[in-house]
Amino acid sequence: MRRAAVAIAAGAMAVSLAACGSAEEADGGKDSTASANKGDDIKVGLLLPENQTARYEKFDRPLIEQKIKELTNGKAKVDYNNAKQDANLQAQQVDTMITNKVDVLILDAVDAKAIKNSVQKAVDAGIKVVAYDRLAEGPISAYTSFDNVAVGKTQGEALLEALGDKAKDGQIVMMNGSVTDPNAAMFKEGAHSALNGKVKVGKEYDTKEWKPENANANMEAAISALGKKKIVGVYSANDGMAGGIITALKAAGINVPVTGQDAELAAVQRIIAGEQFMSVYKPYAPEASAAAEMAVALAQGKSLDSIAKDKVDSESAKAVPSVLVPVTSLTKANVNDTVIKDGVYTADEICTGKYKAACDKLKIG
């Protein structure tokens, strides 16, 4: 089978996000005032942003917890909570972590800017903060995510590939993510870098809270405004929104390429069935592993030099030690080589009921 993946090598890339205002040097090195005498008996706080996207509870949480267990001979304790897309609730959860005296905090922010004061409070209490997946503002000590501009560029390039000559005369709809998520801005930047000048963007939306129902409503509005004959494709920043978008397209009798991200099971099935063109496969294991390794090292007062090879700037911290994980374009041509090979899903999980015939045709499994 021809491998159609578009691999994005991020390990050697130093990503610099636009920094403004006063910035503070991030401290990811050894800190004699931190938990220098701590061994494996540490307490790690883990705060994830929401539970609507399947990845957080199914992959991120168990992977991080397992890696922390491995690194500490089973002695570390993980205090976990999920903010359920509520920034105020997440701020309260940070307060609870401070009260519980965790040694280090792994934080995936609901709202990267709104969480800044909470990050400062944690640091003031002697707790180092590892920003996970989203670059939280404040004096964070470490960060791990994917090359998010490259994610958007991969989506945009894939959409152009799917459109072919149709890109010259038609229009696309762009369904970006939530404005509270800094990753959404980077996905958008990367997508525009690929799409600008090559296809007309008829309508573009920032989707509140990344919710599929909001993407569905936006898509219905775009169809009404542009007319269904003018739309030749849809850029969707993630798979959840792609599901809502495809529902609206089907209701209008439109069948056009739609992008996605996260390689959710439903999206993989839609790709096999020809309803969604692609998703971005982001291997969660290396991201989760990096977060766990950095958190344990910080809790134990150790340097991050051997773990974090990249540096990233935010508006409030510069040269943050970072691990950036490569991504892959997932299409029907490389399901076997990505999510099945890596054990994310089995062929039996993907090839259920109405998808079996398509799986057989593609020799999935």
Image (cartoon, helix red, strand yellow):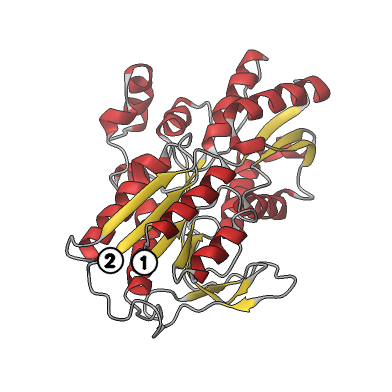
Marks 1 and 2 close (CB-CB < 8 Å)? yes
> Nearer the N terminus, badge 1 or badge 2?
2
Rendering coords of residue 124 (x, y %): 52, 70
Instruction: Describe the element under mark 2 as helix, strand or loop.
Output: loop
Residue type at mark 2 is Ile
Give the residue furthest to the left.
73
Q: How crowded is mark 1: few (under 14 residues within 10 Å), some or many (20 or more)?
A: many
Q: Mark 1 points at which residue?
A: 103
Q: Is residue 208 left or right of residue 132?
A: right
Residue 340 visible? The answer is yes
Give the residue furthest to the front.
99
In front: 335, or 279? 279
Q: In this view, does 128 lie to the left or right of 344?
A: right
Residue 136 visible? The answer is no
Instruction: Describe the element under mark 1 as helix, strand or loop.
Output: loop
Residue at 46% in and 60% down = 326
- Quarter of the image for residue 297 reads bottom left
Q: Residues within 10 Å of mark 2 (few under 14, many from 20)?
A: some
- Quarter of the image for residue 121 reads bottom right
Rendering coords of residue 220 (x, y %): 71, 21
What's the mark number on residue 42?
2
Could you tell me how far apart the alpha carbons at marks 1 and 2 are, in whole angstroms? 6 Å
- Quarter of the image for residue 254 reads top right
Residue type at mark 1 is Asp
* Picture layout, residue 231 above or below residue 85: above
Residue at 61% in and 17% down = 250
- Classify the position of the N terminus by image quarter: top left
Residue at 56% in and 53% down = 151
